[in-house]
Every structure is written in C-alpha cells, then in structure tokens.
Amino acid sequence: MDPETAKKEVAAAMGNAVDHMLQEFVGVRTGKASPSLVENLEVHVESYGSKMRLKELAVINTPEARTIMVQPFDPSVTSDIERAIRENGKLGLNPVSDGKVIRLPIPELTEERRVELVKVIRNMAEESRIRVRASRKDGMDGAKKMKADNILTEDQARDFEGEVQDFTDSHIKEIDEKLAEKEQELMTV
C-alpha cells in the first residue's frame, strides 16, 4: 500500500469515529421532541424474525413540541415497537398506544436526569476517542510495515507518523469540542 492511500484510510477511519459519535449524540434528548430520538432504534420484530430500525417500520413525526408520534405501517408490530422503546434505557420514554398509533410524551428533564445524560455522552465521546486511537495505532503500524518493506525511508516514516499524530490530535480536539457543546446544550435547556 502506498503512503498516501494509508494516510487517507487513517483519516477516514478517524472521521468515521467522530461521525458515529455525533449520530449517537442526536439520540440523547434535550427535552424537545424529535424523530431522530427514536428513528434508529433497533426493534426485534417477532413476526418478521429479525431486527429492523424503527424508521423502516413506521412513520415518525412530532405533532407537538413535547410528543413523538409513531404510526407503524403494519399494526401487528405495534407491541414489538412499544417493547423496544420501553426497554431502551438511554431513552427513558414510556410509550402510550391505542393499538394503531404510539405516542411518546417527552417529559421535562430533571437535574438528575441531565447529569445522567452528561455521563452517557461522556462515555460515547470516550468510545470515539478509543476508536481514533485505534486508527492511530493502525497508521503507526502501517508506517513501520512500509519502512520494513522499504517503501518508506526512515525520514519518510517519521514524517508519516507525524501526520498520523496530527490527524489524531485534530480528531480528539473535535470530539472534545462537540462533547462540550452537547454538555452545554443538555445543562441549559
């Protein structure tokens, strides 16, 4: 593998770690109803025998500022959707169903719940940092291998490792900035 391709792969892997964290952050609610809170929730559907995302099973909208409405395409999966929402500890939502439509009232966030959510997002950020560091290790190992295979000289390998470290530093900084923004959002809403 050539050095430029290796650098691009390392940078892409680190970027994916940050993107994944940002997607998870969307699911951490701030007291406002948003379809994104539940649309990627995995639902084990007994009648289909598999797991599917909620957005594949139902129409999700917000008729009011503090309510999410889930209308399954197939009414027979309503109980499976309710169970998945209720069992997801991260959401803390209690679905109310009339058999055809599921309503999810979004309760006001208490100070205690806000502190819990901050802990949750800090764990998400740490998982992303771990992914970034794993990508860094892969990049450093790649530099050593290319040096051993005489693709890179000693100086080129050092430069390559320096660039990988720069990628790492910038992605870790981005994770920390996004974490601080989300913490601020959770604590001030």
Image (cartoon, rainbow, N blue to C red):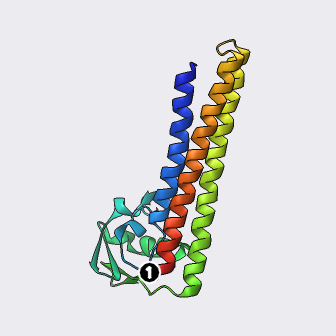
Along the line of sight, which residue is nearer the eye, 3 or 41?
3
Q: In the rendering, at what x and y percent does residue 119 appear?
A: 62, 71
Q: Residues within 10 Å of mark 1 (few under 14, many from 20)?
A: few
Residue at the extreme top of the image, as rendered: 150
Amino acid at the residue labelled 1:
Val
Q: In the rendering, at what x and y percent does residue 37 appear?
A: 42, 69
Residue at x 72% of width, y 18% of height: 154
Question: Vertically, is 137 above or below 176?
Answer: above
Residue at x 61% of width, y 43% of height: 168
Along the line of sight, which residue is nearer the eye, 159 or 97?
159
Question: Vertically, is 71 above or below 51?
Answer: below
Residue at image mark 1? 189
Q: In the rendering, at what x and y percent does residue 94 appear?
A: 46, 83
Picture quadrant of residue 118: bottom right
Picture quadrant of residue 79: bottom left
Along the line of sight, which residue is nearer the eye, 114 or 75?
114
Q: In what element is the residue under mark 1? A: loop
- Number of marks drawn: 1
Q: In the rendering, at what x and y percent does residue 126 appear?
A: 64, 58
Quadrant location, the C terminus: bottom left
Residue at x 59% of width, y 53% of height: 128
Residue at x 54% of width, y 63% of height: 179
Quadrant location, the N terminus: top right
Along the line of sight, which residue is nearer the eye, 149 or 47?
149
The answer, for residue 131, to whether it is visible in the render is yes
The answer, for residue 49, to whether it is visible in the render is no
